[in-house]
Each structure stands twice: as C-alpha cells, then as structure tokens.
Amino acid sequence: MHVRPLAIPGSFEFTPRQFDDNRGSFAEWYRFEPLEEAVGHRLDLRQANISRSAKGVLRGIHYVDLPGQGKYVTCAYGAVLDFVVDIRVGSPTFGQWDVVRLDDKDRRAIYISEGLGHAYVALEEDSIVTYLCSNVYNAQTEGAIQPQDPTIGLTIPEEFGEPILSEKDIVAPTLQELLDAGTLPTWENARGFFR
C-alpha cells in the first residue's frame, strides 16, 4: 500500500495494490500497519458508516469536538472529491484544505485525524462512501461549518451547478463565526490528544 501525507498535518492518502484478472479485481482497502506507521497510533475502530449520495450532493464540512473521531474513508462505488479542512485554531495550516478523488477504480482511502473538518461532493450518481471511525457518533459533540464559506473556498466542480446540501449544512455557521465563538478545536489540544 502506498501512503502519501496530505498538505494538512494529520491527514494521509492510502492507495492499495490491486490485483485484476478475468473475474474482476481484489484489493486490501484497509490494513492497520500502514495506517499505524503513518499516523503514529492504531485506529481504535468503534463505528463504521456508509452513505449513498446523488450526483452533486455536498456533505460537510463536519467535525467532532476533541477527543473527536478519526476517520478512514473510501468510496466503494462511484466517485467523490473528499476534502480535509484544517479547523484547528493555531495550526500552521488553519483554514486551508486538501482534496483527494476517491473512486471505485483506484480504491484510494484517506485518513482524517481527530480535530479536522471533513466534506465530500459526489461526482457520480449513487456514490457510496464508507467510513471507519475511532469513536461512536455523539450528536452533542458534532459540529458543522458552512461548506460554501468563501473564506475556506472549497473548489466544487462547476458542472454540477449549485450543490445539493442538507438543511443542517445550509444553516451551519461560517469558520469565522465559530472562531469568534471560541468553539473550534485547537492545534495545541489536538497535539496533546495524540501525545
């Protein structure tokens, strides 16, 4: 498996070797050793999620208050652009993002550390995304940032027109509003959590 650090500290891309023959293909989409070596600790698997999205659906930017929820994400069917957004106050890349195309051809996955924001847009109809999570869902600790916040400036392909958003994401606060409210995770706390 090939591992590539992304531009946002604490996020990584994983590209598996695939074995193709006349029956189809096979790949190990998750293996603990490469993840542990890259991240510095094991993924303590507590929950697995799956979502199906229509073409043009934009989900996120979502995050979980620390201790948070680390996520290992892949696209089992279709294709998505998956965004990692640094929302950790004091981080050298605060407010910046990186993006990886996840699809059912290359079978890439990304790891998103606790304290980071996450969003994706479906590039194909009925795209299926799966997540392995280090913590269980808790509505009390989940947060959302307006995915079309111009200060973040996620690049969504124009071919989709206006992305399809949930009501929760439409009314989510901007990054600046959350910064002013003092409710975002901090770089210091995130680093302390990993130590």
Image (cartoon, rainbow, N blue to C red):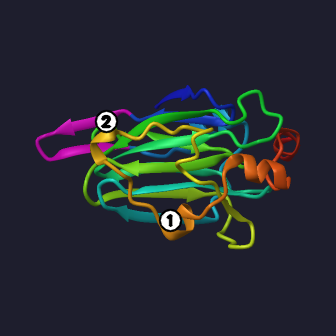
Q: Is residue 36 left or right of residue 147?
A: right
| Image x and y of residue 177, in percent | 74, 52
- Element under disc 1: strand
The front one of 4 and 19 is 4
Q: In percent of the image, x 74 and y 66: which residue is there?
A: 141
CA–CA distance in space, label 1 to label 2: 23 Å
Q: Earlier in the sequence, mark 1 or mark 2?
A: 2
Label 2 crowd bin: few (<14), some (14–19), many (20+), radius 10 Å: some
| Image x and y of residue 166, in percent | 47, 66
Q: In percent of the image, x 83 and y 44: which residue is there?
A: 186
Q: Are marks 1 and 2 in contact (CB under 8 Å)?
A: no
The front one of 55 and 21 is 55
Q: Residue 82, labelled with which disc?
A: none
Label 1 crowd bin: few (<14), some (14–19), many (20+), radius 10 Å: few
Q: Residue 49, labelled with which disc?
A: 1
Q: In percent of the image, x 32 and y 36: which residue is there?
A: 106
- Which amino acid type corresponds to the residue marked 1 in the rendered image? Asn
Q: Is residue 67 left or right of residue 116?
A: right
Magenta highlight: main SS: strand
Q: Does the segment drawn in magenta span residue 26? A: yes
- Which amino acid type corresponds to the residue marked 2 in the rendered image? Gln
Q: Please provide the residue range marked out in magenta.
A: 17-27
**Quarter of the figure with residue 187:** top right
The front one of 131 and 40 is 131
* Viewer-nearest of discs 1 and 2: 1
Q: Quickly name the residue at label 2.
A: 18
The answer to whether residue 141 is above or below residue 75 is below
Q: Does the segment drawn in magenta span residue 54? A: no
